[in-house]
Image: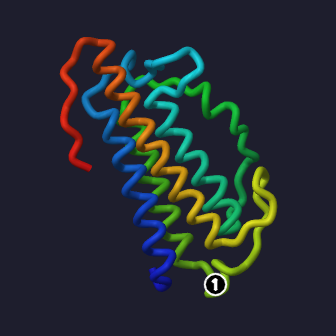
Amino acid sequence: MSNKEIEVLWSHIVRSQEHLISCLDGLGEDDINWRPLENANSLYVLATHMMSNMKETILAILCGQTMSKRQREDDFKAVGTAIEPVRESWNELKKRIESNLTLLQSDALDKEYTHPRRGKITGREILVVVAKHAAEHFGQAELTLDLLRKARGRPLPIHHF
């Protein structure tokens, strides 16, 4: 990427999303869809919700890509059968975002965009908000994974992130 600031913010987003997805490693269908509370998020929901968020905020809003209108509420109803499709979707999305970020004009970070829930927001704020959001959901995924292991009687590993 030609813009160092975009590169740094994007690297933080990628790192959080990849750590979040790694929380699903080795889990079966029941585990990836397990919720610690009825209205809490599953690991699958967290991983797919962040990708949906990135499509909307980075690809559609910041990069101007045409996309179908996001139904955010549907993110939290998602159910999956395996981790492989999540990982494949992430790898495809990551490449697509990276190629679009390299095409941004030099004023893209300072320019104002209209976000559907945040109103007027700069390109820089978009990337900071997505980075923060991804980090928060990674933390939530780690906690959910620990709660899942405890509920299933599995040992709790020491996290080294």
Residue 59 screen position, x and y as percent? 62, 61
The amino acid type, in three-letter code, at marker 1 is: Gln
Residue 62 screen position, x and y as percent? 66, 67
Residue 52 is left or right of residue 70, and the answer is: left
Image position of 10 with respect to 87: above or below:
below
Q: Which scheme is used to colour this image of the protein?
A: rainbow
The residue positioned 25% from the left and 29% from the top of the image is 26
Q: Number of marks in the image?
A: 1
Label 1, on which residue?
A: 105
The residue positioned 46% from the left and 59% from the top of the image is 13
Where the N terminus falls, by quadrant?
bottom left
Q: Nearer the viewer, residue 84 or 19?
A: 19
Residue 66 is left or right of residue 55, and the answer is: right
Q: Nearer the viewer, residue 78 or 92?
A: 78
Residue 152 is left or right of residue 130, and the answer is: left
Image position of 29 with respect to 106: above or below:
above
Give the class, few, some or many, for how many residues have Cα within 10 Å of label 1's Cα (few <14, many ≥20). Answer: few
Residue 96 screen position, x and y as percent? 51, 62
Describe the element under mark 1 as helix, strand or loop.
loop
Residue 38 screen position, x and y as percent? 56, 15
The residue positioned 47% from the left and 66% from the top of the image is 10
Residue 130 is left or right of residue 65, and the answer is: left
The residue positioned 53% from the left and 47% from the top of the image is 51
